[in-house]
Amino acid sequence: MPDVLVVGAGPVGLTLALQAHRHGASVRIVERRAEPFRPSRALIVQPRTLEVLQPLGVVPALMARSDIAPRARLHVGANTVPVEIGPFGWRDTAFPHLTMITQMNVETVLAAALAERGVPIEWGTELASLTDEGSRMRVRLGTTDGYAEETCAFLAGCDGADSTARRLAGIGWRGRPYRQEIVLADLDLSGDLQPGVAHVVVARSGVVFVFALGERARWRLLVARPGGDGPDAPGIDELQAVLDDSGLGARITRMAWSSRVRLRHGVATTYRRGRVLLAGDAAHTHSPAAAQGMNTGIQDAANLGWKLAFAGRGRDATALLDSYETERRPVAGRILALTDAVFWGESAGGTAGLLRGLLAPLAAPVLPLMLRAPGLLSLGGRMLSQLWVRYPTGPAATDEWPTADRLPRPGARLPDDSVVCGNERLPVHRLLERPGVHVLLQRDAADPRLSRPGPYVHVHRLADRVGGGVVAVRPDGYVGYRCGTVDDRLPAWLARVGAL
Ligand SMILES: Cc1cc2nc3c(=O)[nH]c(=O)nc-3n(C[C@H](O)[C@H](O)[C@H](O)COP(=O)(O)OP(=O)(O)OC[C@H]3O[C@@H](n4cnc5c(N)ncnc54)[C@H](O)[C@@H]3O)c2cc1C
């Protein structure tokens, strides 16, 4: 019986499977689709996502497929404004940039990392029913050969916005459809669009993006606009009309694929019922504006994966598992508010359309100056980066010394500052690459008394941090414990979260 059955091999399920497996869980991952390829939706990975993926060893492969200095041309009325996005000059992260990479590339890299660990994705296998038997889950999995009954300790529902796991577990959904829609297409275009850059047209009718990131053709069209009742796959005439309205002067020479995405926003009424836990779009869905959905889901997975693995080690892990929702639900709330506001601004009709139509041409002449102003793009990038995520204190983020203000606060992300450890000066995140909890001792701290440290506790002494205090950094890179002195409370906390 596997410790964790992951349902769905999207970016969230793949990350969760990796995070749980490297922390000692036995994992199965099933996916309804018969084959890996599907047209990408997400195109941007945020800095905090790269930080949580770094210990999984996948970042070099992601970087090899990414553009970290994306260029765009903003077309506003008769004006065209070239924009170069980043790097932002932030010193607390190894990833101070916007990263453009297709969702398919992200999934390919994560799937390859899972394969390297010997965890196969079971394609063409879908969750059909589940029963929580108290001490384990019983599930029915369907393939073209029929149905098979299986058991698992925990089930992670990473099966997207229409989650079967959510429905079968009887978890409700609070949300509503948007009035706006997204139209996507992969196109070959003639005309004089500058190659290799993203073209963005802000108009009263919505915002048109043409990215040089097509998968089945050269360009990817993405239109955010007031919703209509068109067909699920918009035809070439509808798409040509969009391009004609945009004024980009491009003609479609081939349409490889198109889709009309009718979006909803909302959150599951709970992230956990018994042994079923939800992550990613299964737990929260919102518009793609501001490029947050996949990023938020991957970070759910980084938070939940190690907790499921450590919870499977036989002790009462209720508090640890409950901390997943306590920590991640408020993040989804903030992301929903942010993406709703941006989506309204870029795609709503009525007042928003009027404002776009009026303000965009007025702003066009000053845009180049505004974009050159130090800090403006950086501020915007920081808002979207998710580097701001921090969790409330609780069982997985315990503060034993609230006045120790020279130590990072539990629940906060550990900034990637430079430290001295052994005889080496290095970014502190490099110390966090092995799976498990990392105990960071200040220079003069006592050695912790850990009778059996095991494979998931690593102790580092920071020679340039004066004092006798200690912090413990969790596998997802958040501070889990802080104390101004090293005593028996540290091993007690490590045992409570299942690391010992
Ligand atoms: C137009 C658009 C643009 C976007 N751009 C961005 C962006 O730039 N940045 C960003 O962060 N996000 C973006 N998003 C959001 C992002 O695509 C989603 O948040 C992300 O795909 C969610 O990942 P997931 O793994 O939770 O779910 P999914 O990607 O939906 O994967 C769920 C998987 O579960 C499988 N499945 C479903 N039911 C079952 C079952 N019963 N049994 C087995 N398997 C099952 C499905 O086949 C699927 O493979 C965008 C979304 C859209 C629509």
Image (cartoon, rainbow, N blue to C red):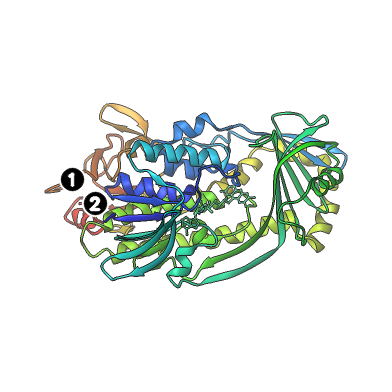
Q: Which residue is mark 2?
A: 499
Residue 346 or residue 14, whichever sits in front: 14
- Direction from residue 259 to residue 59 in the image, left or right: left
Amino acid type at mark 1: Gly
Could you give the CA–CA distance between mark 1 and mark 2, rounded to whole angstroms? 8 Å
Asked whether disc 1 touches disc 2, contact meaning CB atoms under 8 Å apart, the reply is: yes
Q: Single out the residue that lies furthest toward the left.
A: 451
* Residue at x 52%, y 57% (from the top left corner): 160
Amino acid type at mark 2: Ala
The crowd level at tag 1 (other Cα within 10 Å; few <14, some 14-19, many 20+) is few
- Direction from residue 24 to residue 370 in the image, left or right: right
Q: Single out the residue that lies furthest toward the front.
A: 145
Q: Position of residue 147 (x, y in %)?
A: 39, 60
* Residue at x 48%, y 69% (from the top left corner): 167
Q: Position of residue 406 (x, y in %)?
A: 35, 48
Residue 486 or residue 406, whichever sits in front: 486
Quadrant of residue 135 within the rendered picture: bottom left
Q: Which residue is mark 1?
A: 454
Q: Position of residue 93 (x, y in %)?
A: 47, 38
Quadrant of residue 379 within the rendered picture: top right
Q: Regarding mark 2 in the picture, which secondary structure is present there?
A: loop
Choose the circle earlier in sequence order: 1 or 2. 1
* Residue at x 42%, y 54% (from the top left corner): 145
- Direction from residue 22 to residue 84 in the image, left or right: right
Q: Single out the residue that lies furthest toward the top.
A: 423
The image quadrant where one finds the N terminus is: bottom left
| Residue 374 visible, this orientation | yes
